[in-house]
Amino acid sequence: MFFMNEFKHILPGELDESAFRLIGKEWMLITAGTVKKWNTMTASWGAMGELWFKPVVFTFFRPQRYTLEFVEREPLFTLCFFDAKHREALNFCGSHSGRDCDKAKETGLTPFEVAPGAVAFEEARLILVCRKLYFQDLDPANFLDTGIEKNYPKKDYHRMFVGEVLQTMGSRQDF
């Protein structure tokens, strides 16, 4: 059972974490939907920063990802970061589709409604609740480094979303 006092609210600008480490090394779960119907996926590409005078994240989805359907439909999504002991769960969520399995049941992660219309996981050490602001499909005609194309042998270019960070929460023992 989730208790709000297990997490500490943090202003995004006071978060003392490396986005390079969080996203590129530790990975994250991007989750969208409601507690009744949601999906999550592991991501190791993305960014955090400031845009339009707002704290934002940049997330990327290939067109075949089931989670993309949820992100397109819902106004909110979450980014959850975990301790190393949850790496197996992250591996599972990145290599299995929610179309074919119950990711919570398979991984032991516990989904909860962190905000109206936003799902996160009790086991996360850091949660960012985000509101979609913008999306854009990556266009290979705009790749200035031609080597980027090697990431797309199936020509399944990512859709990028910019999300405003509305709420940042860290587990009390970490923050």
Image (cartoon, grey):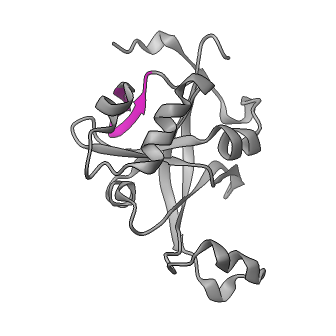
Q: Residue at x 59, y 82 (%)?
A: 139
- Quick one: quadrant of the C terminus? top right
Q: Residue 16: give x, y in percent of width and height.
A: 77, 29
In-front residue for pair 54/132: 132
- Quadrant of the rendered image containing residue 65: bottom left
Most common secondary structure along the magenta stretch: strand
- State the residue lying farthest toward the left: 36
Q: Residue at x 34, y 53 (%)?
A: 74
Q: Which residues are magenta?
A: 111-122
Q: Residue 20: give x, y in percent of width and height.
A: 75, 45
Please indicate whether residue 114 sits to the left or right of residue 10 in the image. Answer: left
Total marks shown come to 0
- Quick one: quadrant of the N terminus? top left
Residue 50 lies in the magenta-colored region: no
Q: As displayed, is residue 97 above or below residue 109?
A: below
- State the residue lying farthest toward the bottom: 141
Please indicate whether residue 164 sits to the left or right of residue 102 in the image. Answer: right
Q: Residue 9: give x, y in percent of width and height.
A: 58, 22
Is residue 167 something that shows in the picture? Answer: yes
Q: As displayed, is residue 151 above or below residue 162?
A: below
Q: Residue at x 63, y 10 (%)?
A: 173
Q: Residue 69: give x, y in percent of width and height.
A: 33, 60
Is residue 78 something that shows in the picture? Answer: no
Q: Residue at x 26, y 43 (%)?
A: 101
